[in-house]
Image (cartoon, helix red, strand yellow):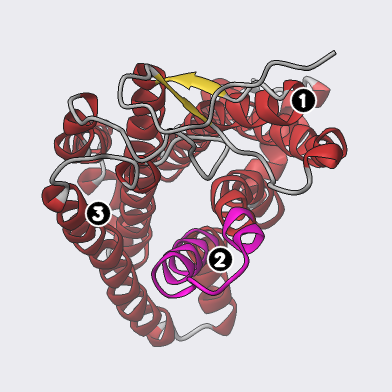
Amino acid sequence: MSLDKPDERPNGNSSSFLLTGFPGLEAAHHWISTPFFFIYISVLLGNSTLLLLIKEDHNLHEPMYYFLAMLAATDLGLTLTTMPTVLRVLWLDHREIGKVACFSQAYFIHSLAFVESGVLLAMAYDRFIAIRNPLRYTSILTYTQVLKIGLGVLLRGFVSVIPPIVPLYFFPYCHSHVLSHAFCLHQDVIKLACADTTFNRLYPVVLVVFIFVLDSLIILISYVLILKSVLRIASKEERAKAFNTCVSHICSVLVFYVTVIGLSLIHRFGKQVPHIVHLTMSYVYFLFPPLMNPIFYSVKTKQIRSGFLRLFTNHPSPSHRM
């Protein structure tokens, strides 16, 4: 008895694409899915708990933690966008995805990646103000100002990705309809189009330069200025305390941008690198930052640790005590 498999031949009229798991390791997909599932659950639990904690604990109703909530929400969104199709491919060998669903997934994946970069930039600005101008911190970063920054970050991420995504709905696809990942990426889909894709190839490069590169440079400059301010503090204990408030954010920045740079270098210059390395780097990029960010902030931020203790032991927060 033969099993029917989706046709992988080029078909310009096809209304769907085929996702790909780990080529050559199909027999082990069920085993490979196990760590993915546990990471998925860990990301959901870690970031959801962080959001709940910031919502419930009034001691965390400060600009720093509002930005942290934005980061956790972005990580949740990115994980919920990518992982369902990954697990569906690995568990059920369900590879087919409709074009509209595929393009929508690509839109949210790329938008949320740019939003995450923007949130990390906003968090760097928060630390810059807190250390360079502590007396005016609450008057500069008011609730309204934080809301405006968050809205600006969201608009930049979600609006900037529209121009390259919209043409995907109108391109014919005749080379093939087999994608190289278990989720849809713009750069993956565009390779299958039988049309002039010059704009779709150039615009993302410009976007990456103006968002990822520019954001990372501004964050770097802000930390150079922060370091100068910290070194001016006379007390060694106060210097350590001031710098310690930045450690979690520095870890999040390094994890995010190192994985972005690693993935970009492999895509640009790693044509001779085995495809499994490309796949692994893609999953590291999408899963490692959302997994690690709650851990960084839980381990290195005393207020978060205390908040978790109060949340799970029903201890009242200090501000609620008589």
For this view, does 66 lie left or right of residue 244? left
Amino acid type for the residue under numbered disc 1: Trp
Within-10-Å neighbours for mark 2: few <14, some 14–19, many 20+: some
Q: Position of residue 110 (x, y in %)?
A: 35, 41
What's the residue type where badge 2 is placed? Val
For residue 191, say whether it is visible. yes
Upstream in the sequence, badge 1 or badge 2? 1
Q: Helix, strand or loop at disc 2?
A: helix
Q: Is residue 264 left or right of residue 211?
A: right
Magenta highlight range: 255-279
Q: Earlier in the sequence, mark 1 or mark 3?
A: 1
Magenta stretch secondary structure, dominant: helix
Q: Residue 141 in the image: state x and y as whole percent.
A: 26, 44
Up/down of 252 relative to 266, above or below: above
Would you name the residue on which mark 1 appears? 91
- Asked if disc 1 and disc 2 are in contact, CB closer than 8 Å, the reply is no
Residue that appears at 65% across and 45% down: 291
Secondary element type, mark 1: helix
Query: Viewer-proximal residue, 33 or 117?
Result: 33
Q: Quadrant of the N terminus?
A: top right
Q: Secondary structure at mark 3?
A: helix
Q: Position of residue 150 (x, y in %)?
A: 28, 36
Residue drawn at the location 28% of the way across and 62% of the way down: 215
The span from disc 1 to disc 2 (Cα, nearest Å) is 38 Å
| Disc 1 to disc 3, C-alpha distance | 53 Å
Picture quadrant of residue 278: bottom right
Kindly identify which residue carries mark 3.
136
> Depth check: 99 or 195 in front?
195
